Amino acid sequence: MVLTHTTNHTYAHPFPTVTLAFFLRYYSPQLNPFSSHVLSTDTISSHVDPDTGRLHTVRVHMKKTRLPSAVVKILPSSVTGGGGDKSSYVLETSVVDIKEGWMKTESRNMNYTGVLSVVEEQHYSTTPPDQATTSTPSPNPAAMIRSSAAPSTQKPLFPNTFVTTTFCYQSTLGGKKPERAVAKSTDDAKEPRPQRFGEWISGWGAKRIQQSIESIASNKTDDQMIKSRDGMRIVLERLRSNGVVAVLRELRRREGKSVFDQQ
């Protein structure tokens, strides 16, 4: 079973600014106070496709994670490792087409996948979801005036950016793979824990447990989205108020670096 949760949101900022805020949202708690749970961010790869001009990026975020207390309560500590904060890794892939005005991202957890797999997909666009295949929104007149001096090939700067976010939750706890591991371990008297876990799964019913875990995680989605959007809003407002270079210079100053560091 896969449980999905989809929401739509509009940022009152142009697309280039929103995409920049997306990549900066975990830069530091000073820029985004809602990112204090992010311990580190590493860029695995980043390149521009010479044929399409699209930016492809792969990053890994290490986060301080706490499993939902309701999940911890219904699962044995041999599965969850007990309560409390833990480090987890999230793989993020993104594709940005600045010319066409869209960005697609996907984030998925790399830890606890046996308990719950969470995939977050986002589609950012200058076009509202309900007009994506019918028409193109009219840009702000002021933006048209600002773009009149630009080359005719440049697209107008739309004042809003629309994002559709879909979460997919899937638990495979007690599925075929764990059951095979349990069957294999029953012959080994020195490893009683998997056998106890198998008996516990059989008593509750794998599907019932999976559905409970997926439901618990889905119910927390709205709260997570509020915090995520609040963090983006703060980054966007700082970029609009102070400018990109000023924001980066201030962040670098706090780190004791120059925004224009040279090798």
Image (spheres, rainbow, N blue to C red):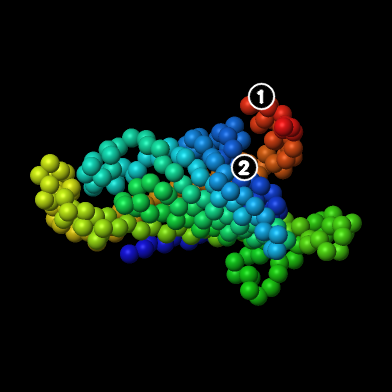
The answer to whether residue 59 is above or below residue 151 is above
Residue 158 visible, this orientation: yes
Q: Residue at left 45%, top 52%? A: 108
Q: Is 18 placed left or right of 176 in the picture?
A: right
Near mark 1 (Cα within 10 A), the count class, few <14, some 14-19 or many ≥20, is few
- Report the residue marked by disc 2: 24
How many labels sit on residues?
A: 2
The residue drawn where x is 58% and y is 34% is 28
Name, please, the residue furthest toward the bottom: 134
Q: Residues within 10 Å of mark 2 (few under 14, many from 20)?
A: some
Where is mark 1, residue-wise? 256
Task: Residue type at mark 2: give it.
Answer: Leu
The residue located at (41%, 41%) in the rendering is: 88
Left or right, 155 with reference to 90: right
Q: Nearer the viewer, residue 252 or 145?
A: 252
**What is the CA distance from the residue labelled 2 to the residue labelled 1?**
18 Å
**Which element carries disc 1, helix, strand or loop?**
loop
Considering every residue shown, the one lying at the far right of the view is 149
The tag on residue 128 is: none
| Residue 204 visible in the picture | no
Q: Nearer the viewer, residue 9 or 172?
A: 172
Q: Amino acid at mark 1?
A: Gly
| Sequence-wise first label, 2 or 1 | 2
- Quarter of the image for the C terminus: give it: top right
Secondary structure category for the residue under label 2: helix
Q: Nearer the viewer, mark 2 or mark 1?
A: 1
| Residue closer to the observer: 114 or 243 | 114
Image check: 1 left or right of 109? Answer: left
Residue 188 % position (x, y): 12, 47
